Image (tube, rainbow, N blue to C red):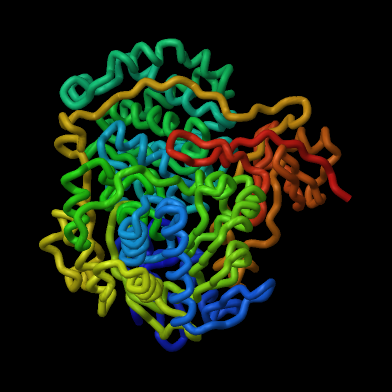
Amino acid sequence: MKAVVCPYCGFGCRLLVDEKTMKVKPYPGEPNRGKLCPKGLHSTEFVRSGGRLRRPLKRVGSAMVPVSWGVAIEEISNKLLEIRELYGADAVAFLASSKISNEENYLVQKIARLFGTNNIDNCARLCHEASVHALKLAVGTGAQTNPYEDLEAFNAILIWGYNPAETHPVVMDYILRAKRNGAKIIVVDVRETRTMAFADYKLVIRPGTDITLANAIANVIIREELYDEDFVRSRTDGFSEVRMGVMKYTPEYAEKVTGVSAETIQEVARTFARAGSGALMWGMGLTQHVSGVENVLAVINLALLLGYIGERGGLYPMRGQNNVQGAAYMGALSEFLPGYIPLTDERFRKRVASLWGVEDLPTERGLYLTELWDAIERGDVRALYIVGENPAVSEADFIHVRKALRKLDLLVVQDLFMTRTARYAHYVLPASAFCEKSGSYMNSERRIQWSHRVCEPYGDSKPDWKILMMLGKALGLPGFDYSSIEEITAEYFRLFPELEERSVEELKNSDGIFLPRKRLHTWEFATPDGKARLIAVEQIEPWERPDKEYPLVLTTVRKISHYNTGEMTLRSSSLVRLMGEPKALINEKDAKKLGINDGDWVEIETRRGKIRMRAKVGGVPEGVIAVPFHFKANKLTSPALNKAGTPEFKFSACRVKRFG
């Protein structure tokens, strides 16, 4: 059996896959320690399912016809060069993928920048880019600070806007081990989640009031002098501003805003502060708001006030996809080079350019993924090359996205299936699945792991790195004559001082290599003066509020047996059976008021459109509707962006009625 990295969530489980039967067993080592969730257990089913792309396709009129690889790559490269000649390099944009390897993401951003544009992004923009921005402001590094294993040793774990029991089931093993060791588990969310079943404190808040709650907890910690005075004085700046900023956020005030009792807020603040060590874990319930960056800063303040950093605590922005951390770290972001190094860092930029055989690289920030669609509508972007992403379903207000895709002079989609996005393409290139190729991946804790090839590519599909190498050569870019995936690994290793002395063979024969190290900020922070920043933030209202016309709040949720836009999980018969029919959750009082019974068909409408699905009565507070985002929910969601370019998926004003 061969060890591969699971293609689903960002926890980074490794699987042992039988080369003949494709059956899966859990890897006994780190990080999953012999555990798997349902998605991991059935992860190979989609690989041999119907619908895999076998050959390159070209649009001729309304039909897609097969062409050879040579013809496809030649025509695509010629069109890209023609568009650059007519409109400039920034008329072209590239989307990398959270599902392809580090090496492949590295090549996508290398192609973009050598082509002459920083219009390179990935779906990190839709999930944790707010975390990256907040973490860089506060502690200097935009990534998770500690390994999973540290969770077992902390005395408290505060889980905010995040439901690991469904989204990262294997991490629950670490959390429950901590609980058995005496740790207090505190969960904050807008509904009662599966994770709350294991919590000592369950705080169900009104959507969009996270900053008020976090500031109220900080108010108690400061007012009652529960903060770590030595840590705050020696290792942080900004305490006076935060102390003044949270003064008005008393528990009594926060109770009126959030719906959580003042007594509970005080008890949680005291419990978390007196624990002596603690982790802060959060998900998209914090980041997918117009206040996403500020939401994350508000909870980071709690960790910094208490000195919960290094050996005594950690910051855990839990990543949703198996290589979204790797895509970001490899530089597939419009404002960062590899390693989250800003484009304006001339010394590092010149180092990258030298490695690639050119004098310099473009310095202007490229378009965020979420800014692309308006740029296409304006005619600023004429060509889009997409690797392994499905924005026609995953983007907020996706009707707008689909209109933009139709306007492109050239759309190339490189993927496993004829996705909803691929239907708009001029060329579709068949890529190989995760177990049909080798490469490295980086999980949420920054652990780089090697994934081995188990079987041959399907049909005439090719590993993404081989397709990208062909494209780079056809575009006339330097340095695209790799003979193996390992050569690309060695090249990106040379960009990071921590990896320069490490070998690819060492990576292949280990449980992974942490980049830059296992724990961050143990002695100093990655800021110019080595100190963290406590940053005062105020409550920010959602972009749109419920009113008489749209009186309810729509939020989106994940399901344990399903994944993103469904292209993989909906082709797994085992997961489809486990998932069952998707349903919209509605509160009992709201259902009674609207004449809705459990199992009824309902129509949910926002200012952007309407969808229909069955209702499940219960599971959410009054005034809230929760819909699984894996299907068609993003027809409804708000396109309003926060400072990091992430849409407000978690808060849209809506109305609901019984249908049929």
- Specify whether 346 is left or right of 280: left
Q: Residue at 57% x, 20% y: name it.
A: 257
Vertical relation: 504 (above or below) 545: below
Of residues 347 and 202, the one drawn nearer to the viewer in this rendering = 347
Considering only vertical position in the picture, is 150 above or below 439?
A: above
Quadrant occupied by the N terminus:
bottom left
Image quadrant where residue 624 sits: top right
Camera sees residue 610: yes
Left or right? Give the position of 487 relative to 424.
left
> Which quadrant holds residue 49?
bottom right
User: Is 188 drawn above or below residue 404 in the view shown?
Assistant: above
> Where's residue 401, x and y in %?
61, 51
Classify residue 497 as left or right of residue 588.
left
What is the x, y in percent for residue 51?
60, 77
Toward the bottom, the furthest residue is 20
Q: Where does residue 493 sit, x and y in percent of width and height?
A: 19, 62
What residue lies at 31% left-to-right and 66% top-to-bottom?
Answer: 103
How far across and down, in percent of the image, does residue 458 sit? 48, 83
- Left or right: residue 317 compared with residue 289: left
Task: Please state which of residues 604 and 213 is positioned toward the viewer in this rendering.
Answer: 604
